[in-house]
Amino acid sequence: MISKLRITVVLAVGTVLIAGCNTVETVTFSPSAHQSAIVRDGIPAIVSQQKQSIVLVSPSGRGEPANGRVAFTVAIDNLTNSPLNVAVSDIQIAQTLSDGTEVALRAIPYDQLVTEEKQKEVAMALLTGLAAGANAYSAARAGYGNVNGIVYTPHGAAHYSGTYYSPTAAAVAQANANFQNEAMIQNTIATGQKNMTLLDRMILKDNTVMPHEWIGGRVIISAPISEPGKIKSYNIRIKVGNDWHSIDVSQHRRS
């Protein structure tokens, strides 16, 4: 059954960390009944099999960030002859703190991630616009210069100062500024398009999984609470049709 999941392909999709630069913590799984802990390409994963479905869960990289949101790659296989529905809003995450208190975490929906990415793009566009404006201003002033000197006359030395304007220097500076501004703008646009494409391709969305079909994607979870010197323990429950897959996760600093 497990071979049907094409595990190698699924894990390869999730090798890039969304979280960016951060201290990475080790993730381990505690398998329960009908579950198996495995390792693929050095990355831990857990396979959970229920009556109607198989679910594979793995960190979306070699660990999880110590601070901020965490990301898991999820693969789902429909074992039945009927379609099964999967909704991201049905994913339940609960963190158990050291005093036994349970705190609900949240699977971030795709629409929210898109909105956040668009806000980042607006901020980047504003910064690019400011930089382009500064370039243009500097170029506009590039043709002007100051001169200072001493002129010796029959009446003695005389100091002088003045300004000059060089059309050639101004034209060269303006051409350079235009090239730099165009490159910055194109880079901002390309980065935004790339990020949106990655979101669209990689984030798990609501789906009807057809008979004997598998789907896979990344689930972004709100930041677990950090307690000094304590392991982060949380449970991820994934609903597939009438099946509930309960995944126990431990996250701790590498020794």
Image (cartoon, helix red, strand yellow):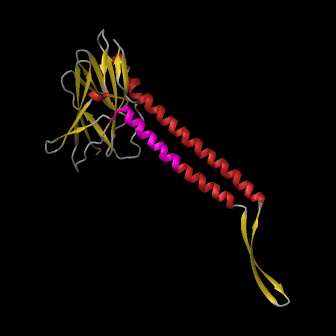
* Residue 9 picture quarter: top left
Please indicate whether residue 154 sits to the left or right of residue 38 in the image. right
Can you see residue 227? yes
Please indicate whether residue 246 sits to the left or right of residue 9 in the image. left
Residue 212 placement (x, y as % from top left):
34, 12
The quarter of the image holding the N terminus is top left
Can you see residue 1? no
Which of the two residues, 202 or 177, is positioned nearer the viewer here? 177
Residue 77 placement (x, y as % from top left):
32, 18
Which of the two residues, 99 or 116, is positioned nearer the viewer here? 116
> In percent of the image, x 46 and y 39: which residue is there?
118
How many numbered markers are drawn? Answer: 0
Magenta residue check for 122: yes
Relative to 228, residue 197 above or below: above
* Residue 95 picture quarter: top left
Magenta residue check for 114: yes
Please indicate whether residue 132 sits to the left or right of residue 94 in the image. right
Relative to 41, residue 172 above or below: below
> In percent of the image, x 33 and y 41: which residue is there?
69
Furthest toward the top, the residue is 81
Furthest toward the right, the residue is 154
> In percent of the image, x 34 and y 18: which residue is there?
208
> In percent of the image, x 30 and y 40: which residue is there?
222
Q: What secondary structure predominates along the stretch shown in magenta?
A: helix
Please indicate whether residue 19 sits to the left or right of residue 134 in the image. left
Relative to 9, residue 230 above or below: below
Furthest toward the bottom, the residue is 155
Which of the two residues, 137 or 186, is positioned nearer the viewer here? 137
Residue 28 placement (x, y as % from top left):
26, 35
* Residue 157 picture quarter: bottom right
Look at the image and give the residue range highlighted in magenta: 108-126
Residue 146 placement (x, y as % from top left):
72, 71
